[in-house]
Image (cartoon, coloured by chain):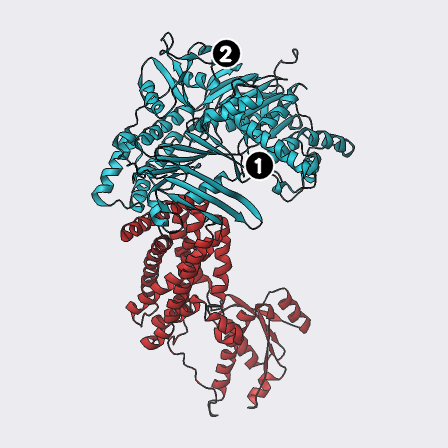
Chain colours: A red, B cyan
Amino acid sequence: MMAGRLWAVIVKELWAILRDPRARIILILPPLMQLFVLGFATTLEVRNTVIGIYDRDGGAWSIELAQRIAASPNVAATLPIFSAADMRRALDRQQVIGVVSIADGFSADLAAGRGAEVQGVFDGRKSNAAQIVAGYLGTIVADLGAELQVRAAPTASVVTHWFNPNLQYLWFTMPGLVVIITTISGLGLTSQTVARERELGSFDQLMVSPLRVPEILIGKVVPPVLVGVVNASIYMILISQVFGVPLTGSVPFFYGALLLYLLALGGVGLLVSSLSQTQQQAFLGMFLVAVPAILLSGYASPVENMPPWLRLVTEADPTKHFLIVSEGVFLKNMPLWDLWSNTWPLAVIAVVTLGASAALFRARME
Amino acid sequence: MTAAPAFTAELHGVSRRFGAATALDDISIVIRPGVMSGLVGPDGAGKTTLIRLLAGLLDPTAGRVTVFGQPATRADRARVGYMPQRFGLYEDLSVIENLRLYANLRGVVARDQARRFDDLLRLTDLTGFQQRLAGRLSGGMKQKLGLACALVQTPDLLLLDEPGVGVDPVSRRELWRMVQNLTGAGIAVLWSTAYLDEAEKCDEVFLLSEGRLLHAGPPGDLTADVAGRVFGLRSPGQGRRRLLAQLMDRDDIRDATIQGGSLRLLMQPGAAPPEAAIPARPRFEDAFVDRLGGGPGGTSALAETYPLIPETGAPVIEAQGLSKRFGAFIAADNIRFDVPRGEIFGLLGPNGAGKSTTFKMLCGLLTPSSGTGRVAGHDLHHARAAARQSLGYMAQKFSLYGDLSVRQNLNFFAGVYGLHGRARRDKIAQMTDIFHLGPYLRQNAGALPLGFKQRLSLACAVMHAPPVLFLDEPTSGVDPIVRREFWSHINGLVQKGVTVLVTTHFMEEAEYCDRIQVIYRAAPIALGTPDSLKSDAAARTGDPDPTLQDAFISLIEDHDARRARTGDAA
């Protein structure tokens, strides 16, 4: 009896997702678009930059440096700068992202075997890009220095990036992006489901039926979970085959964690949905939850940099835990034990949110 | 230029299509000044489309819409008062602020405003509520305020789109009187409604059905068609339902309905009435059904296949002192009644009086603050699931899944009520057969014609053959043929022992009830058969032949008067 009723709800919910034109669009289009658009947009490389060169030296080595900068694949063009006022103007108008200022006597100092100084001035309004460009320029300057000092003992440390030796930004962004997109589409689907019934007027019809609250809620969570599993599988294939990100860890474990994550999302979505009277409210409510969940997940900024109290808050964010699992499985071949320590919190969150949504669902009936 | 035309607005050969659907088909009507014109028809007949055309909000697909001698889209809007179904009141503004806002929008100069507002507030009885927020007004008062806002500048043409919807009969009658008074000043009024009793009171009626104009002219012209063919037949007790079904199936009888303890018959032209039938005054609805080709047959295929619900001797629906409080607000207060097996029991009352609250407590949608309710012997509190399994529920609004196909809806509700496998397939095939849903099985339920939505809702509610049916205004706004068909099924089921609880403020529905509980201001104020309520009203008001609506209004007025007296005494 119970299984029969549950099955009827699951089938109905699946059809509701597949036949409602709005739900169908939420289902297919945005996730794929997001994967491709965000995949290429959240690039961590900085290309097509213009660098100002304020060459107060004009010697052989300063010209050599300027040419090396211009030749870098990350630099589109250089802009000659002739005065401090010029430099200020170029930065202010965003003609350049930064200026390399070469001091008078640069070539002479180098020729004499003394140390020489190069100053970099960057546009602080684009702090992230500026930092990255500063890094590039630093490398170019250091290279030049290294060539000149072959005789001297090299003091620069050699950096190796484990797990992503060539620092391919796609390797870094893609495993995170899977999590983000799964989050948005999962929340989007579940947050609509109860609100839709309320808006269409079928809610009362459902409530007078012999269905019990757990049957309704489970029936409403299963289809979005299925959709989430299908979507995530497509991303996994795309990411590893098309974008070439290595899949080093345990795939079955990933699926287990994914399932728990989707259940936790379902609980959160149902909470939002039970609180909303209309689909529009549910939609806004979904963003109210999704944005902090993503910001606190460590996708945009590392959790380790957050103040301690906020780090505590992130423990309740399922996205944070699943992000660690996803990155661990893709790049690190994380040991199962470490994965597990980030998976069981998902189960706890799922139980709590689903339970809370059932309680709320009952309370909101009145 | 010739002399000014004798009409305010005209539709000439007007059609309007929305995609493949035809909302209006070749309509030609004339709206005259100083005349109360009624635009009458069931939901989906095209009333709103016609009014929007006149208001210049839509272009016709074909034909001409003329207002004040100009195409409607170019007519002087300042001379048109338009009140859409949901008037755009600002709920966070007070009554007077709403009026001021609309007066300013309409360019009424400030020095005229005060006097105009006084007139309008007096007209609409809102003088004492000037400072109240519009959102805090009752449904009837909101409609009155909407009307006042539409009248801030005296229009030459007043378009009212179903001003009576969601308004209880008392307020509806007041609203009607207010508007009728306006025609004295030479205003042309178009009042659209799904209530056929309102049509009778109009000077002129345009009767719409499925986008076609069935009648244009004084309502008397239409009822004249059926004069001498309408009869009443006394038949108290349960036997009247069986008799009704037999009469509806007869060829010489064009239409038959239940009116309390009597049957109302419309004979075919030339056919002799049954013995003991007494001539009755024809009503607009008789004429409407006549125009539509007569009522449906009376045999319910649904009832024939329905299992017989055994008699247990105990009441099937019991309300034992049900009360519901929302904070300090008392929505229902000590409601108490029993409904025996095989009875249709009606809950009647103005909006917000507590009938829906009572209804919802009895079908388990609300938990009572105190008191208990039992359905088919199951306590609503302790045996919720069992109580629910034994009831079928049909809401006033179509509340199935519009995006799902008819078959998916049937599958879902069958599954929810515990039908599986072969039993389910058989049941769905049976329902498809009974309600002629075959051609629609793959279509989205939301896109069904209104009559079929009605059938599907009923099919989903009775698939599990419940002994109790809960109906919430089941036939509000549907055309009289669909309503007759629906009540034929209900009558048939009742004869099989099904017990029915129905809330309504449609008097046509209330007439089908065995007994009616009138609820007003959260408390029961009267309980009786439709006939006894009517005869009580006759004794009270002196009206020899009151309708159920008259009886209802008199009950409420009487109650208010008594409250006022005791209030004065205290």
- In this orientation, which residue lies closer to the viewer: B180 or B205? B180
- In this orientation, which residue lies closer to the viewer: B229 or A295? B229
Relative to B23, is B434 on the left or the right? left
**One can see residue A106 in this view:** yes
Q: Earlier in the sequence, mark 2 or mark 1?
A: 1
Q: Position of residue A271 (x, y in %)?
A: 45, 57
**One can see residue B62 in this view:** no
Residue for point 33% across, 12% down: B252
Going by the numbered disc 2, the residue's amino acid type is Asp
Residue for point 42% across, 14% down: B231
Relative to B376, is B127 on the left or the right? right
Residue at the left extreme, as displayed: B422
For discs 2 and 1, the disc positioned in front in the rendered view? 1
Residue for point 38% across, 46% down: A206
Q: Pointer 1: what residue?
A: B139
Mark 2 vs mark 1, CA separation in Å: 34 Å
Q: What is the secondary structure assignment of the residue under circle 2?
A: helix
Q: Quadrant of residue B403?
A: top left
Q: What is the secondary structure assignment of the residue under circle 1?
A: helix
Residue at the top extreme, as displayed: B270
- In this orientation, which residue lies closer to the viewer: B97 or B459? B459
Q: Position of residue B380 (x, y in %)?
A: 39, 48
Q: Position of residue B443 (x, y in %)?
A: 33, 36
Going by the numbered disc 1, the residue's amino acid type is Gly
Q: Position of residue B308 (x, y in %)?
A: 27, 34
Q: Pointer 2: what residue?
A: B221
Q: Quadrant of residue B352?
A: top right
